[in-house]
Structures are given as C-alpha cells and as structure tokens.
Amino acid sequence: MPRIIVDDHFCKGCGLCVDACPVDIIELDYKKITAKGYHPAYLTDEDKCTGCMSCATMCPDVAITVVR
C-alpha cells in the first residue's frame, strides 16, 4: 500500500503538496510546530493514497518521500 513520509526537518508548511494531492489526503498539522517554526504536512488517510507522487513532485524542499 502506498504512503508518504514527510521529513519535518525540511518541510516548511508551504501547502503545495496539500493543493497537489488529487485525493485530498494531505493536510498541514496545526497542532505541531517543527524546530524551524513551521506546521508540517501529514497524511490523513493512508488507505486512500494512490502513490501518484504529485505531492513529492510539487514539494520545493524535497521533504516528501513516496513509498509504494
């Protein structure tokens, strides 16, 4: 089953991955703040991830890894 891994060290919470996800299962985690002061992205429903890599392609900081 595909899923994504977001590296909080690199994620700056820009939200481009949220907009790029065709199944709307990525959100910014407003309950968490990284060491750099950002709200990182996270996967809300692993079962719906298609592994399309749209989020990883859009990420300007290469913070997302897609596992298939």
Image (cartoon, grey):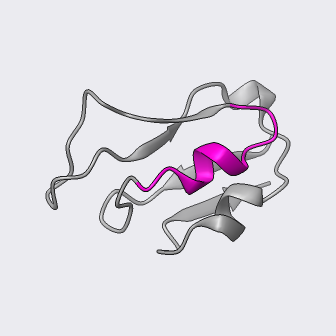
Up-down: is 45 above or below 10? above
Instruction: Please provide percent x and percent y for residue 52.
Output: 85, 54
Instruction: Please provide percent x and percent y for residue 55.
Output: 67, 56
In this rendered view, identify the residue nearer to me: 46 or 33: 33
Question: Is 3 left, or right, of 50 in this rendering?
Answer: left
Q: Residue at (49%, 39%) from the top-left corner?
A: 42
Let me know if residue 22 is in the magenta part: yes
Instruction: Please provide percent x and percent y for residue 16.
Output: 57, 55
Q: Residue at (81%, 40%) from the top-left corner?
A: 22
- In the rendered image, which quarter contains the N terminus? top right
Q: Which residues are magenta?
A: 14-24
Q: Residue at (79%, 28%) from the top-left corner?
A: 48
Question: Is 38 left, or right, of 24 in this rendering?
Answer: left
- In the rendered image, which quarter contains the C terminus? bottom right
In this rendered view, identify the residue nearer to me: 32 or 66: 32
Question: Is 55 left, or right, of 33 in this rendering?
Answer: right
Question: Is 64 left, or right, of 22 in this rendering?
Answer: left
Instruction: Please provide percent x and percent y for residue 41.
Output: 45, 45
